[in-house]
Amino acid sequence: MPQEFTRELAGWALKAGLADLSSEGLDRARLLCMDLLGVMARGSQEPAARLAGRVLLAQGGEPQATVVGRQGRTGALNAALLNGVAGHALDYDDVDQAMYGHPSVPVLPAALAAAELAKASGAALLEAYVLGVEVTCKLAYGMNPKHYQLGWHSTCTLGGMGATVAAARLLGLDEAQMRHALALGASQAGGLQQNFGTMAKPFHAGKAAQNGLLAALLAREGFTGDPAIFEAPLGFFHLFTAGEPVDGGAILARLGRPYEIESPGLIIKKHPSCAFSHPPADAALELFADPRCAPEKIERIAGTIHALADQILIHRQPRTGLQAKFSLEGVLALALCDGKLSLASFSDESVLRPQVRRLVGLCERRPGPAAWADAGDFGPARVEISLTGGEVLSAQVDKAKGSPDNPMSPAEFEAKYRDCCSRVLSQEQIAGSLRLLAGLERLSGVDELLNCFQAA
């Protein structure tokens, strides 16, 4: 472990920039921002986002920053939290394999609010977003799987550190201030996996965004923390891995070599459910397409997944849409009933349909071989169904749709974006936002772009 890990990390975060990205990496960064803003727009209509808005917007505050999917502006800290909640309310936002979590949703809301405060350019916003995601993901390489196995939600813990870096970069902090900001971000880190399948999970993402922005704002004013917060004996690494050694040198060596968004790349979700459910979901959808398969003919369903997927898909008898997003049984039943997994699939009414409940009751979990745990992209998974008459059908998916090795096409990306935005924004707003996002790094400011995301 480098004795000055925190200093070296802060120094890197202040020197790196968009010039280090390939043209493909820059394209990917724009696309990831587009994806999350679309998901954020649709998520702003979800109960978790509405309830959080009811509480936070009642507190008032200076109109400093945009709340996506609403009219008007609010204080930057509350905007960061509300946009983070909205961005994760559907569990439709991007994922990183090493992180076992969602890197963009804590980082981009913090960066958006900081960019509005600093009147930053589109290039500065994009740069801060890329660096925040990079720090989030590369910390995971040194801390996972132990960190995640302990039950921490890395979207909140690691994502909060990335949010701090992004906000600090936009607010113009120097190296010493950056180190203090990281200490303040670390002291706010939290998030428990036991809350998966409840509104607390998107709250984790919102808090990570807000925590990062608050840490940077305080540090800019001279507020202090331990400047060696990662490597200190009772610091971030020690606490969040239960004392297991962390190779800080390896983390530093990975930064920007290459950037995570370039290789191996983030997973962009095709389905609005937990990423661990996507390989079995795709296998079930493949079976549904077989003309021999019909929901009423299914007598047994077996889903084979690896151990970590079994840990995270915690709801075996889902009774709500939120629970079904974190349920192997719920996702398989929905896919095999309907032949698709849409935003509407994960409503409470959808999950409680008698035909869905019947198939949930027919599901059996099976452990996959140990080698699957290291296969990447949250898979593989295998689904086998037994039909009346004794016929057995099976399908295996190694890389779910949306993974870097099985990517969505540009047309599929835009279709997802338009679908997410369509119930919140006007067609003119959607078209305008797509035009501005295509040239994000050329914008002199972010106001025109964010105005496109005010509720129609």
Image (cartoon, rainbow, N blue to C red):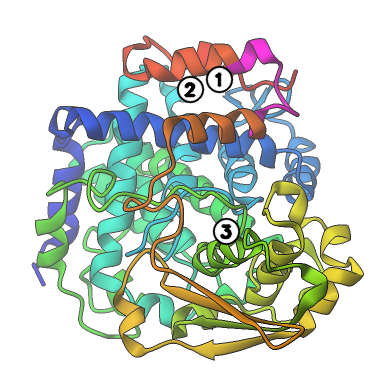
Query: What's under tag 3, amino acid-wise?
Result: His
Residue 421 sits inside the magenta stretch:
yes
Q: Is residue 28 magenta?
A: no
Q: Residue at x 13, y 33 (%)?
A: 20
Residue 4 occupies quadrant: bottom left
Q: Nearer the viewer, residue 56 or 225?
A: 56
209 w.r.t. 35: above or below: below
Q: Which residue is mark 1?
A: 450
Secondary structure beneath disc 3?
A: helix
The quarter of the picture where residue 438 lies is: top left
**Residue flagged by tag 2: what amino acid is it?**
Glu
Where is residue 246 drawn, in percent x and y? 20, 76
**Secondary structure beneath label 1:** helix
- Residue at (15% x, 68% y) in the render: 248
Q: Which mark is residue 335?
A: none
Mark 2, other Cα within 10 Å: few <14 / some 14–19 / many ≥20: many
Mark 2 touches mark 1? (CB < 8 Å)? yes
- Distance Cα–Cα, label 3 vs label 2: 23 Å
User: Residue 166 versus residue 270: which sits nearer the camera?
Assistant: 270
The boundaries of the magenta stretch are 420-430
